[in-house]
Amino acid sequence: MNQYITLEKLGEGTYATVYKGRHRTNNTVVALKEIHLDAEEGTPSTAIREISLMKELKHVNIVRLYDVIHTETKLTLIFEFCDVDLKRYMDQHGERGALRPDVVRSFMYQLCKGTAFCHENQVLHRDLKPQNLLINAKGELKLGDFGLARAFGVPVNTFSNEVVTLWYRAPDVLLGSRTYSTSIDVWSCGCIFAEMISGLPLFRGRDNGDQLLHIMRVVGTPTEQQFNKMKAESPEIHVKPFPRYPKQSMSVCVAKIGPHGSGAVDLLDCLIKFDPMERMSAADALRHVYFTAINGQYPTPAPPGSMAPPAFNFPHPHGDFRQPAPAQHQQQYLPTAPMSMYAPSMPGAQIPGVAQVPAHLQAQAMHHAQMQAVQAQGMMQPGMQPAMPPQGMGQPGMPQGYGYAGAQYHR
C-alpha cells in the first residue's frame, strides 16, 4: 500500500470500507476498497467472488479493477475512481430526481451495454440499483459492486434468492425462485429506467409480499396458467392466492414519461414483465426503437459538480450485438449493420501485472471453479513493479467516488 496515499473516506459497509486515494508516482486518483480479514473466518466469499469476476470483465461500462494488495490483516482492491453514483447524480442534476430525456437515454444505453456484456460473459450481477451504478467526469456510467455477482452456465445452477435490493428484485425471485438467470438483471434495469424518468422508485414495497403486490398493481396479477408456467420452469416457486389486479399502462404508472416518447414506454414494458421468459434481453434492448431517435448523436450528461450539461457528438451507438431478435419484437429493432459504440474508449484498457490473489485465499471460496479462477498471468513476479492505473483516470478534487455507493455499500 506504500504506493497509494489515502485521501478521504467515501463509504463503509458490512465488510469493506472505501477510500479515495492517489497513486504516489503518477498522481492518478483511485478508489481503495479495504476489506478487513477475520482471523477465524478469513476472506469473505463476496470479496473472492468480486475479484475473480472483475479481473475478467473489462468493458467501458464496468468499473475497472486495477490491482489487489494483500496483507495479513486486510485485502485492498484498487478500482478506477468514479465521481458519483447514479442515485447521487439524480439528486444533484435531476428535477426532484427525474433526469432529462437525453440524459436518461444515454445512461440507459450504457446500463444495457454493461449488463449485456456481463451476460455475454456468463455473469449475473444480481444487485443492480442506482447506488451501484457509478458515473465519472466524462458522463460514462459503469456497473460497480460485484460482491453478489455469480457466474452461470456451469453445472451448479441453483442460486440463492437473497439477492438484489428489494425494490429492484424480480417477482420470480420474490416468489422463491433459485433457478433464475439473466432476466433478474433485466428486471432491475427496467426499474432503474423508470426511476431515472420519474425520480422515484417504481415499486416501493416494505417486504417480499408487499413488493409483489406493488408489482401486480402495475403489471397485473398473472393468471393461474401463467403461474403454472413459471412453476414448471422453477418448481421451487411458492404461489399463494393474490388479489386480481388488471395490467396498467406504463404511461400512466411512470410519472413524467411523456417527454421521453412512446419508445421509452414500449422499452419499459418489454423489460418489466412478470414472467422472466417474456422479458427482453439486455442485448436485444440495445436494438430497441427507443435508441434510434438520436440522429447519430449522443449527449454527454453533466459531469458531477456542474449543472450545465455539455453536448458531445459520438458515432451512432449500435452493432455490438448482432444476433437476430425474437420474432415478436423484430419490428422494434434497428438494422443490424455493425457500427462503433458511442462511449469513448477509456485509456489504458489493458493493464499488465495485476496482482494475483494468493492461492490460500482462493481456496476459501466454496464456489465453482469459474469463480475461483484468477488468471495466472496476473501473478506478481519477484522484482516486478505493481500495476499502475493509467494516467488521467481520476480528477483530483472531484467529490465522491467509486465507494460512494457509500453507506449502502455491502450491507
Image (cartoon, grey):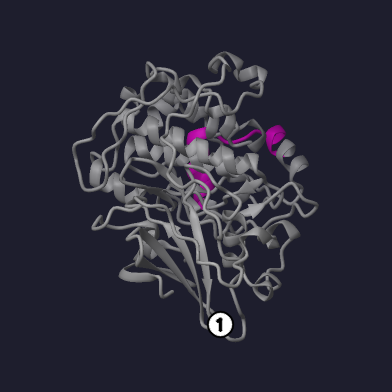
In this picture, is 164 found above or below 49? Answer: above
Residue to which mark 1 is pinned: 38
Identify the secondary structure beneath mark 1. loop
Q: Main secondary structure of the magenta part?
A: helix
Relative placement, left or right, of 311 versus 12 is: left
Query: Residue 12 at what x, y percent from top left?
Result: 39, 69
In this picture, is 299 found above or below 57? Answer: above
Question: Residue 13: which quarter of the image?
Answer: bottom left
Magenta part of the chain = 210-227
Q: Nearer the viewer, residue 77 or 46?
A: 77
Q: Nearer the viewer, residue 327 or 220?
A: 327
Picture residue at 31% right of the left edge, 23% below the top:
259
Query: Residue 295 at what x, y percent from top left?
Result: 37, 16
Kind of residue at disc 1: Asp
Q: Nearer the viewer, residue 194 or 50?
A: 50
Question: Residue 24: which quarter of the image?
Answer: bottom left
Query: Residue 38 at what x, y percent from top left?
Result: 56, 82
